[in-house]
């Protein structure tokens, strides 16, 4: 008898930090009221659970591996941009309030710039140590 064993990937959500140690996404979350913080963290938990299988309307692929997490807070359309790397990591890069039908190219470019900086400063081994995972 054969069994089909499916092991779900355990995703790890990490906050990108600019070279000065500040995290645009963490700073944004910290600046919100407790109720909105809970909503954001709940959606981040859902992203951590589903990874790239998180469907619309929660998430969408923008371009070149940059994704958006879509959140409505007190009538505002909030977007957190992120990318996947090293098999099971999700890196949250930047956040903004969407005010038009299109995602500003400047925000996508900022996320790409942060991704490039991230890969210049960190590798998979470092991230696995950071989360205390055996390599």
Image (cartoon, rainbow, N blue to C red):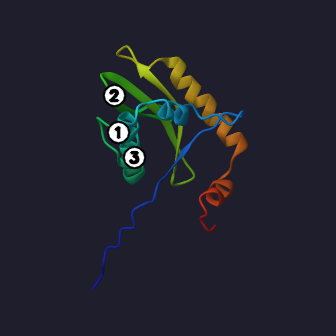
Q: Answer left or right for 41 relative to 1.
A: right
Whether residues under marks 3 and 1 lie with C-beta atoms below 8 angstroms apart, the answer is no
Between marks 3 and 1, how big is the CA–CA gap? Answer: 13 Å
Q: Residue at x 35, y 32 (%)?
A: 71
Whether residues under marks 1 and 2 lie with C-beta atoms below 8 angstroms apart, the answer is yes
Q: Residue at x 35, y 23 (%)?
A: 77
- Which element carries disc 1, helix, strand or loop? helix
Number of residues whose C-alpha sits closer than 10 Å to that of mark 1, classed few (under 14), some (14–19) or many (20 or more): some
Q: Residue at x 62, y 59 (%)?
A: 128
Q: Answer left or right for 10 relative to 42.
A: right
Q: Can you identify the residue that label 2 sits on?
A: 73
The answer to whether residue 80 is above or below residue 102 is below
Q: Nearer the viewer, mark 3 or mark 1?
A: 1
Q: How many numbered marks does the figure carry?
A: 3
Q: Earlier along the polypeptide chain: callout 2 or callout 3? A: 3
Whole-percent x, y for residue 89 in the image: 53, 50
Residue 93 visible in the snapshot = no
Q: Earlier along the polypeptide chain: callout 3 or callout 1? A: 1
- Which quarter of the rendering shows the N terminus? bottom left
Q: Can you identify the residue that label 3 sits on?
A: 47
Q: Nearer the viewer, mark 2 or mark 3?
A: 2
Closest to the observer, 38 or 112: 38
Number of residues whose C-alpha sits closer than 10 Å to that of mark 2, classed few (under 14), some (14–19) or many (20 or more): some
Q: Can you identify the residue that label 1 sits on?
A: 39
Between marks 1 and 2, how big is the CA–CA gap? Answer: 8 Å
Closest to the observer, 40 or 9: 40
Closest to the observer, 10 or 5: 10
Residue 69: which quarter of the image? top left
Q: Earlier along the polypeptide chain: callout 1 or callout 2? A: 1
Between marks 2 and 3, how big is the CA–CA gap? Answer: 17 Å
């Amino acid at each position: 008898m054969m069994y089909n064993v499916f092991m779900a990937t355990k995703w790890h959500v990490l906050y990108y930090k600019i070279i000065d140690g500040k995290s645009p996404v963490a700073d944004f979350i910290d600046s919100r009221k407790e109720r909105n913080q809970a909503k954001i963290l709940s959606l981040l938990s859902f992203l951590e659970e589903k990874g790239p299988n998180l469907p619309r309307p929660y998430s969408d692929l923008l371009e070149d591996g940059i994704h958006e997490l879509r959140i409505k807070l007190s009538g505002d359309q909030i977007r957190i941009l992120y990318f996947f790397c090293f098999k099971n990591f999700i890196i949250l890069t930047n956040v903004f309030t969407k005010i038009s039908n299109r995602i500003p190219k400047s925000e996508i470019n900022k996320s790409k710039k942060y991704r490039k900086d991230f890969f210049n400063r960190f590798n998979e081994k470092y991230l696995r140590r950071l989360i205390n995972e055996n390599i």
